[in-house]
Image: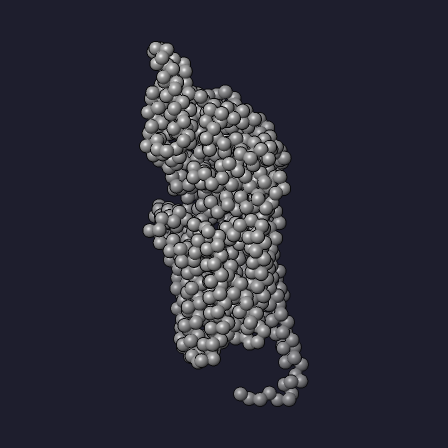
């Protein structure tokens, strides 16, 4: 290499160039730092953390792209050539183009455009990061240290929260609360796992205190990943560590390296593994947190794990949807609505899936098989390019970065197989880093590209960032509204703080559907019902049905309206329609029983019962149906035969046995009076209570549930309903008394008791017990529990 002349060191152009390089390097690190701040970003009153995160990213993108536009020195002639020659970029751009086309053909354009803008935000972040890091990959170790500091702070805070919650509540509750700033334990585990390759790289590269700091960070992060017990993260972590150690051993096999690996990599991992198993054993959990080996074993569907089986059902549904819409799918972002009909036989109440827990299948379902192939090709090209760079005689930095990109791709790819990182900002950071390190890790030089072309590129990115800013802000405001509504509705209809007119002015256009798949316009109908503005309510429920006709919620509210207006035929029609739409929904089932009992239609009652028990079988179903039959003057002997059909399934259930004795007593009385037709029927207090509850007249419902409890004191369902009525009437201390009696009942496993009990404790300012029960409800996937935990228990 030629030596620099003395004149070079005094050359003002050379000094200016160096100053510019230093300045741009600082700005590059600042951009990466700003992105990493997402992991500490406040929720700002939004129901989902992703809304403020996407808004923040769109702001950062806009500022950064403007900065690049104003500093054309960043736009080297070769960067555009790199983009044009990269097959990874071509696949990425084609994928986005097909996604854009699918928004036009989507069943719900509002959802599609919001999802497309989220993908656009990520694409803009990628382009900005690629431009800033182009010819600056020597910063990789600075980036590694910056990521390590971020992971350490994040992990330390979460570990401290875990210890405090374990002391004040229980280990199981503490395990379930490890979420970081992601709102979900699996997403947090995947996010940490995606940063493990940087920690491993830093441990090998740095020395002294930096090496030991990275080793400590690796230990804490790994401990949290293992404690979360996410199967996808277990797989990814195993592959990353094995691949890293194997490759490093092959590349640099010597005794000193082996000792370093043992003390700074393997030892922290082993200690984390041992501590995790010890804590799992101490928790005495029989489910998710029993042991690492047991958790890994549940990956097999043969183990009959509920979460695995439901995920397989979602995958089957995604394949069916894709087959029905093979070209452009159902539209980007439309899964949360269009998948609901496929889930009505597998999901209780109004539980819906936001995603099928497989990004690749979701892409096929939403945008067609061709786009799935394009998206898969992105990973295939990245895999081929990075393997080639690792195996050929490139510069050491090129090989190291290619290997790092491979590890990042493994982490992201495994999560994409089992979860939904495509729409999670913290995971998209990992995706962007993997993509950028793949694309710009090359020495292409080309002076044919004009500065104008480069400036047009960044001007396009700036425009896209500003457009995305509008949609991300709209989404943020929508999620803020939804968060307020969730809190408001939880107080019960009598205590709503919002008025119908206020809600109407806040209804967003983008998105027009909430996170739980409920059209926002439906909220206007619900508040109109409260104010008895029935004509307006029906108008908005009709609009809601056009947006999402698959939940039955609008039909159920119409049933309530027509019941209130004493239009029994219309009320019965909509109650039955709601139940037909969601036959696993308990509220719809009870409403159908009410209208059938009022019509004294025993055939319809038995039809409703037989439909419901295809999916839900518990003694309470036979109790509720027998009450409806009794109200319809079904003969006692036939009701006894009906209860016997329940005792075949639950032969030792005390509630059914007591109910049978009650009817046997009435039958004996009828026989003693030698009457051919007698008006003696079984107590119907349960069904009367259910009628009042359906009207949200919880004071009257409570009165009749208490009467039913005196007749059947061991009925755990009645006890739960008494507690719920007390909660709905803001008598939280009384609610706690009754709900505590129903905890751990084998008949109540859906998490509803824990949810209402947790809310009751929170309303009495007992945050410790409130969060404990709410986290238990979340672990049982009870709707709404995760959102309340994220808001009040972090």
Residue 138 at x, y = what percent? 54, 74
Residue 207 at x, y = what percent? 55, 76
The image quadrant that residue 22 belongs to is: bottom right
Residue at image point 53% right, 87% down:
1
Question: Can the viewer see residue 2?
Answer: yes
* Left or right relative to 615: residue 40: right
Residue at image point 46% right, 59% down:
277
Up-down relation of residue 374 to residue 311 (above or below): below
**Residue toward you, 160 or 555:** 160
Question: Can the viewer see residue 110?
Answer: no
**Residue toward you, 248 or 463:** 248
Residue at image point 33% right, 51% down:
302
Residue 134 at x, y = what percent? 53, 70
**Residue toward you, 52 or 331:** 52
Structure colour scheme = one colour
The image quadrant that residue 585 belongs to is: top left
Residue at image point 58% right, 38% down:
760
Q: How many circles with numbers are drawn on the protein? A: 0
Up-down relation of residue 466 to residue 493 (above or below): below
**Residue toward you, 681 or 377:** 681
Residue 23 at x, y = what percent? 64, 71
Up-down relation of residue 24 to residue 287 (above or below): below
């Amino acid at each position: 290499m030629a030596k620099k002349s003395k004149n070079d060191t005094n050359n003002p152009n050379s000094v200016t160039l160096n100053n510019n390089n230093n300045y741009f390097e600082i700005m590059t690190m600042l951009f990466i730092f700003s992105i990493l701040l997402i992991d500490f970003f406040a929720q700002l009153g939004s129901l989902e953390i992703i809304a403020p995160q996407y808004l923040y990213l769109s702001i950062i993108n806009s500022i950064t792209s403007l900065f690049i536009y104003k500093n054309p020195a960043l736009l080297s002639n070769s960067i555009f050539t790199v983009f044009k020659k990269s097959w990874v970029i071509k696949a990425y751009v084609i994928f986005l183009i097909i996604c854009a086309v699918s928004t036009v053909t989507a069943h719900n354009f509002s959802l599609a455009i919001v999802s497309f803008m989220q993908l656009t935000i990520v694409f803009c972040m990628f382009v900005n990061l690629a431009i800033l890091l182009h010819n600056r990959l020597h910063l990789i170790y600075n980036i590694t240290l910056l990521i390590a500091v971020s992971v350490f702070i994040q992990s330390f805070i979460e570990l401290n929260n875990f210890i405090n919650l374990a002391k004040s509540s229980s280990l199981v509750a503490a395990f379930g609360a490890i979420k970081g700033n992601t709102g979900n334990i699996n997403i947090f585990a995947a996010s940490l796992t995606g940063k493990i390759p940087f920690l491993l790289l830093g441990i090998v590269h740095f020395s002294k205190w930096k090496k030991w700091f990275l080793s400590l960070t690796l230990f804490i992060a790994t401990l949290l990943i293992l404690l979360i017990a996410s199967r996808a993260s277990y797989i990814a972590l195993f592959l990353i560590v094995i691949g890293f150690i194997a490759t490093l051993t092959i590349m640099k096999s010597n005794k000193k390296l082996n000792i370093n690996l043992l003390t700074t990599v393997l030892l922290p991992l082993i200690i984390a593994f041992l501590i995790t198993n010890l804590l799992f054993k101490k928790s005495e959990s029989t489910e998710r947190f029993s042991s690492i080996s047991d958790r890994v074993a549940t990956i097999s569907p043969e183990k009959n794990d509920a979460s695995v089986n439901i995920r397989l059902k979602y995958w089957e549904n995604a394949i069916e949807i894709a087959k029905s819409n093979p070209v452009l799918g159902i539209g980007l972002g439309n899964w949360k609505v269009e998948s609901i009909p496929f889930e009505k036989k597998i999901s209780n109440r109004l539980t819906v899936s936001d995603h099928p827990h497989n990004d690749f299948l979701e892409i096929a379902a939403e945008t067609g098989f061709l786009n799935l192939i394009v998206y898969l090709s992105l990973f295939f090209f990245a895999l081929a390019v990075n393997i080639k760079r690792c195996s050929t005689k490139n510069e050491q930095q090129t090989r190291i970065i290619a290997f790092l990109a491979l590890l990042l791709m493994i982490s992201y790819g495994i999560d994409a197989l089992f979860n939904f990182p495509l729409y999670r900002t913290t995971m998209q950071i990992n995706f962007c880093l993997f993509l950028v390190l793949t694309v710009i890790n090359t020495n292409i030089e080309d002076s044919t590209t004009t500065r104008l072309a480069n400036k047009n590129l960044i001007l396009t990115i700036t425009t896209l960032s500003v457009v995305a800013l509008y949609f991300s802000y709209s989404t943020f405001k929508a999620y803020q509204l939804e968060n307020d509504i969730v809190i408001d509705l939880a107080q019960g209809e009598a205590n709503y703080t919002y008025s119908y007119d206020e809600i109407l002015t806040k209804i967003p256009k983008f998105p027009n559907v909430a996170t739980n798949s409920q059209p926002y316009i439906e909220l206007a109908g619900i508040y109109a019902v409260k104010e008895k503005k029935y004509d307006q309510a029906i108008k908005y429920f009709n609009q809601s049905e056009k947006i999402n006709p698959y939940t039955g919620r609008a039909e159920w509210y119409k049933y309530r309206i027509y019941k209130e207006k004493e239009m029994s035929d219309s009320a019965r029609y909509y109650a039955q329609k709601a139940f037909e739409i969601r036959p696993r929904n308990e509220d719809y089932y009870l409403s159908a029983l009410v209208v059938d009992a009022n019509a004294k239609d025993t055939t319809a009652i038995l039809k409703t019962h037989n439909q419901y028990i295809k999916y839900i079988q518990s003694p309470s179903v036979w109790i509720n149906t027998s009450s409806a039959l009794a109200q319809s003057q079904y003969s006692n002997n036939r009701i006894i035969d009906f209860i016997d059909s329940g005792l075949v399934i639950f032969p030792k259930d005390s509630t059914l046995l007591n109910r049978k004795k009650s009817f046997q007593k009435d039958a004996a009385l009828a026989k003693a009076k030698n009457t051919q037709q007698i008006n003696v029927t079984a107590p119907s207090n349960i069904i009367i209570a259910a009628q009042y509850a359906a009207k949200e007249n919880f004071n009257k419902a409570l009165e009749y549930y208490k009467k039913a409890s005196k007749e059947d004191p061991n009925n755990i369902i009645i006890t739960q309903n008494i507690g719920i009525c007390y909660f709905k009437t803001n008598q939280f201390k009384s609610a706690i008394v009754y709900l505590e009696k129903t905890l751990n009942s084998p008949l109540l496993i859906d998490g509803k008791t824990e949810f209402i009990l947790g809310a009751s404790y929170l309303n009495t300012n007992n945050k410790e017990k409130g969060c404990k029960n709410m986290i238990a409800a979340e672990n049982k996937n009870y709707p709404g529990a995760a959102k309340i935990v994220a808001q009040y228990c972090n």
